[in-house]
């Protein structure tokens, strides 16, 4: 069991009895690249998780051990800076956020590891950031609220990983609720839970197994393109503060001024926000086929207008769509690789997985890994600190 492995590793490398924290990865049913545009997302925390064993150590250093990489890393807490080791950057980024808020972080030992596949678009990095933020908040009795921890984890990603991400992933890891998806308004940060029964409709993830190297830089470029679009629109419509406020008519009206690329990026975001709203109505009505149609629309927009898909993801969605029992499928997360998310009727899951593996092998000569996920609660304490 993962919790035993992480606790045992902690005891082997360090001495004290640690606090044990669980931080889940996430899926997103619909609402992609809308979070940093003040729009809507519909994620859920899943049963792929990263565990943290953490204890204070009475020194001025953080001694970190990545169980999955079998690597140690030591941080002098007086000088926390971004470095070469990527996994350590996520943790250092979180420490830096506590320090920015004037909270002194004393020396601590930390072992972490889990089963969120890396680079698969399931937010392993957000789980790492949120897990440590939550653990330090507990150990230091800092009394920060979950939304504040989500913001700190997001800023850790901006400043120490160089990705100008929105807040969806960190929010989902911290605010997940078992058997529910959560619609987040990324501007007001209001949220609403909707029941989602994964025994009635399975969530199957198809891992393309690729992560194209452009992913981070293209992500930041998309964000800039959206900001350019807002800057143009705002000259004509001062009320447009983000693309969430824009309409398709406004975009069309100023298409020439926006230019083709920015126009298409903006069009995608405006349409995707509308799809999230429609999808929630379908969910309330229990209409999974209609929900699935919104997912296909999302994929088409991400592929054609937002241009963050790739051949592997397109092959997976095209292969899934005609299969019996498939309600919907689309690429998920930032794009350029990672997983597709598929909603599949329970009695068709086995046939679906077999057919998808065969299609991926036949069309691209690639092995396909699939995961059936359940929806779990957000970050929590598994074993409290004894100190
Ligand atoms: C990545 C980011 F981290 C999220 O904030 C979000 O923008 C997503 O890509 C795309 O919807 O996961």
Image (tube, rainbow, N blue to C red):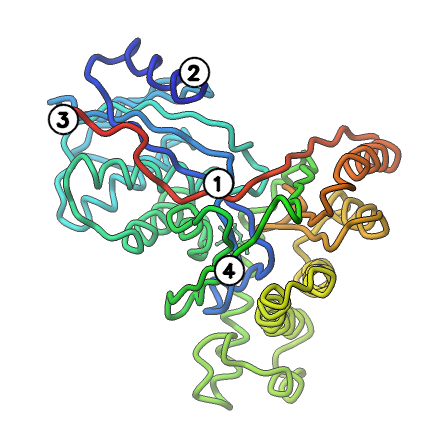
Picture layout, residue 169 above or below residue 1: below
The residue that disc 1 covers is 25
Q: Nearer the viewer, mark 4 or mark 1?
A: 4
Badge 2 crowding class, 10 Å Cα cut-off, few under 14, some 14 to 19, many 20 or more, is few
Residue 299: x and y in percent read: 70, 58
Q: Nearer the viewer, mark 2 or mark 3?
A: 2
Q: Would you say 287 lies left or right of 132 here?
A: right
Q: Would you say 229 lies left or right of 155 here?
A: right
Work out how far the residue at label 1 is from the one at label 2, CA to CA, in angstroms: 21 Å
The residue that disc 3 covers is 60
Work out how far the residue at label 2 is from the one at label 3, CA to CA, in angstroms: 23 Å
The secondary element bearing badge 1 is classed as strand
Residue 378: x and y in percent read: 40, 44
Report if the CB atoms under discs 2 and 4 are less than 8 Å apart.
no
The residue that disc 2 covers is 70
Q: Does label 4 point to a residue whose CB lies under 8 Å from ligand 1?
A: no
The secondary element bearing badge 3 is classed as loop
The secondary element bearing badge 2 is classed as loop
Report if the CB atoms under discs 3 and 1 are less than 8 Å apart.
no
Badge 3 crowding class, 10 Å Cα cut-off, few under 14, some 14 to 19, many 20 or more, is some
């Amino acid at each position: 069991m993962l919790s035993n492995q992480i606790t045992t590793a902690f005891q082997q490398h360090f001495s004290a009895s640690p606090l044990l924290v669980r931080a889940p990865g996430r899926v997103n049913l619909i609402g992609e690249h809308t979070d940093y545009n003040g729009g809507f997302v519909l994620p859920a925390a899943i049963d792929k998780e990263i565990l943290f064993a953490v204890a204070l150590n009475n020194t001025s250093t953080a001694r970190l051990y990545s169980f999955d990489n079998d690597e140690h890393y030591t941080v002098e807490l007086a000088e926390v800076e971004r470095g070469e080791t990527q996994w350590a950057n996520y943790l250092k980024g979180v420490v830096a956020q506590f320090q920015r808020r004037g909270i002194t972080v004393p020396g601590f030992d930390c072992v972490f590891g889990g089963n969120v596949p890396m680079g698969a678009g399931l937010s392993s990095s957000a789980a790492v950031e949120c897990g440590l933020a939550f653990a330090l908040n507990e150990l230091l009795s800092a009394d920060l609220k979950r939304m504040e921890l989500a913001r700190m984890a997001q800023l850790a990603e901006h400043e120490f990983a160089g990705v100008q991400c929105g807040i969806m992933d960190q929010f989902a890891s911290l605010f997940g609720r078992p058997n529910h998806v959560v619609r987040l308004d990324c501007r007001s940060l209001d949220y609403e839970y909707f029941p989602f029964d994964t025994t009635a409709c399975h969530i199957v993830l198809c891992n393309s197994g690729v992560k194209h190297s452009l992913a981070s830089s293209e992500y930041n470029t998309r964000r800039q393109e959206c900001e350019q679009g807002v800057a143009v629109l705002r000259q004509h419509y001062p009320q447009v503060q983000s693309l969430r406020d824009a309409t398709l008519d406004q975009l069309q009206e100023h298409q020439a001024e926006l230019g083709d690329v920015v126009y298409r990026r903006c069009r995608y975001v405006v349409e995707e926000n509308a799809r999230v709203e429609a999808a929630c109505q379908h969910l309330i009505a229990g209409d999974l086929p209609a929900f699935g149609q919104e997912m296909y629309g999302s994929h088409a927009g991400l592929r054609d207008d937002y241009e963050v898909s790739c051949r592997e993801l397109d092959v997976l969605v095209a292969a899934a769509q005609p299969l019996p029992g498939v309600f919907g499928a689309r690429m998920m997360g930032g794009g350029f690789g990672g997983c597709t998310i598929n909603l599949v009727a329970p009695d068709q899951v086995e046939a679906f997985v077999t057919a998808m593996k065969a299609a991926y092998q036949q069309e691209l000569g690639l092995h396909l890994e699939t995961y059936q996920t359940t929806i779990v609660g957000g970050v929590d304490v598994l074993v409290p600190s004894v100190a």
